Amino acid sequence: MIAVIPLAGAGTKLRPHTYTQPKSLIPIAGKPIIGYIIDQLREVGVKDFVFVIGYLGDKIREYIDESYPNINKQYVVQLEREGLGHAVWLTKDVIAPNEDIIIILGDTIMDINLKKIIESPNSLLGVKKVEDPRLFGVAEFDENNVITHLSEKPRIPMSNMALVGLYKIKNSSILFNALDYNIKNNIRTHNEFFLTDGLQRMLENGEKFIAEKIENWYDCGQKEVLLATNKMILKKYALDQSKHLGLENSIIVEPVFIGKNAIVKNSIIGPNVTIGESAVIEYTIARNSIIGNYTRLKEVVLSSSLIGSDSVIHGSKQSLSIGDNTELDLR
């Protein structure tokens, strides 16, 4: 089993944060999104990884090489963003024929039984009911969860079950043959080569896919979802931060994560707050927020905010979404 993790997207919905760092490196509860994905896969025995990088790919590579120096890994570069199908197709030269593969999108966190999925004898596609399936790849399946049809962002969806960025494929060669056919024949949807179209071609050629329903799925491409994911992970891996060495005359309302060398003085923090490494927080009230590394806050009231690294904010009471290296004086 080899894991393919596409990471080449620009993360436009998370700007300004993604001007300076890829969305997969945005920290949640003290760890970048991609770190949770790698850890989940390693816990169930996956040892081989292929990362598809593009936008700010050097930063992703640096993080993975430093944090996971001992995993078997290869990098494939997607220079032009031609779609997810194209990104996966680019890995064909580094994956052995007939290999079992699992594809997980690099901005997606799922609370799932990954071991069950990997050990299944079938090819599986993760699905979840959504309000507006026109924004997603859509799966139709029968009473036995056998998928009968797939379509990407259909104008008139025949199902409200969306593909959620989890694909377990039993035979890599069959997938690559389908993607190769679509690319050579310029078969696009919305001007991109989608993975969904390659999977649909596999269906038409007789391959069997089972729909695996995923309840706890977080597509971390928007501020609100990032904050919800932060809340979920803080609750799941709750740590007692009341004895953190950097606390002084402050109240902590769990769950909260406070990074290494961070200082919190005369403040009320929580619930559901992540504070990055070496941040300095003074005379501040913060709840339901993520605060980046080396950021300085003074006399700030934050709620449902996403603050980038190396930022300075003095005097504010509002919901904020501020990128890296920003200085605001709102007194």
Image: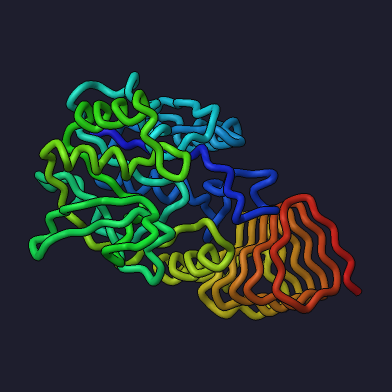
Camera-side residue: 207 or 29? 207
Residue 66 at x, y percent in the picture: 53, 33
Residue 148 at x, y percent in the picture: 16, 53
Rendered position, 42 above or below 300: above
Residue 185 at x, y percent in the picture: 34, 26
The image quarter containing residue 48 is: top left
Camera-side residue: 1 or 68? 1
Residue at figure coordinates x 10%, y 39% from the top left: 206
Q: Going by the image, does 221 lie left or right of 233?
A: right
Which quadrant holds the C terminus? bottom right
Question: Is residue 266 in view from this perspective?
Answer: no
Q: Going by the image, does 37 lie left or right of 119?
A: right
Which quadrant holds the N terminus? top left
Question: Is residue 214 in view from this perspective?
Answer: yes
What is the count of numbered marks?
A: 0
Which scheme is used to colour this image of the protein? rainbow
The image quarter containing residue 142 is: bottom left
Q: Going by the image, does 238 lie left or right of 279?
A: left
Rendered position, 201 above or below 73: below
Residue 79 at x, y percent in the picture: 54, 27
The image quarter containing residue 194 is: top left
Camera-side residue: 331 or 71? 331
Residue at figure coordinates x 85%, y 73% from the top left: 315
Residue at figure coordinates x 56%, y 54% from the top left: 27
Camera-side residue: 30 or 73? 73
Residue at figure coordinates x 32%, y 45% from the top left: 196
Rendered position, 125 above or below 161: above
Q: Going by the image, does 63 lie left or right of 108?
A: right
